[in-house]
Image (cartoon, grey):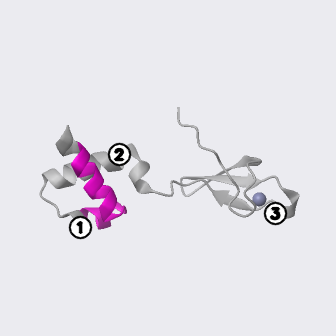
Amino acid sequence: MVAVALKCPFCGSEDVRPYGTSNGKKRYACNNPACSHKTFYAEYTYNGCKPNVKKDIIKWAADGAGIRATARELGVSPDTVIKELKKKKSR
Ligand SMILES: [Zn+2]
């Protein structure tokens, strides 16, 4: 289980509640009245955190894709790609 500390991006409060989904993304609403109950999406800030992206990085590298092309296609930074490839080599 992944524990994600959800925070309202507007006030930083962790007092948030699920607010359904939109476009496949989970949506949350802030319970802070000062925030006028704004809604926001819970998203991974870094795609590199997603396990399937790591697998894709390895797969793309095996197919001979360049680091920059892989990063661009997967929506991660080149640093993330390099890090993953280094991890794989050290294994
Ligand atoms: Zn808020």
**Which residue type does callout 3 highlight?**
Cys
Image quadrant in which you'd find residue 71: bottom left
Q: Is mark 1 within 8 Å of ligand 1?
A: no
Residue wearing tag 2: 52
Ligand 1 sits in quadrant: bottom right
- Residue 84 part of the magenta-drawn span: yes
Residue in the image at 39% along x and 53% along y: 48
Residue wearing tag 3: 35
* Secondary structure beneath label 1: helix
**Which residue type does callout 2 highlight?**
Asn
Most frequent secondary structure within the magenta stretch: helix
* Secondary structure beneath label 2: helix
Residue in the image at 81% along x and 52% along y: 31
Q: Is mark 3 within 8 Å of ligand 1?
A: yes
65 shown above or below 2: below
Q: Residues within 10 Å of mark 3 (few under 14, many from 20)?
A: some
CA gap, disc 3 to disc 2? 35 Å
Q: Which residues are magenta?
A: 69-87
- Residue 88 part of the magenta-drawn span: no
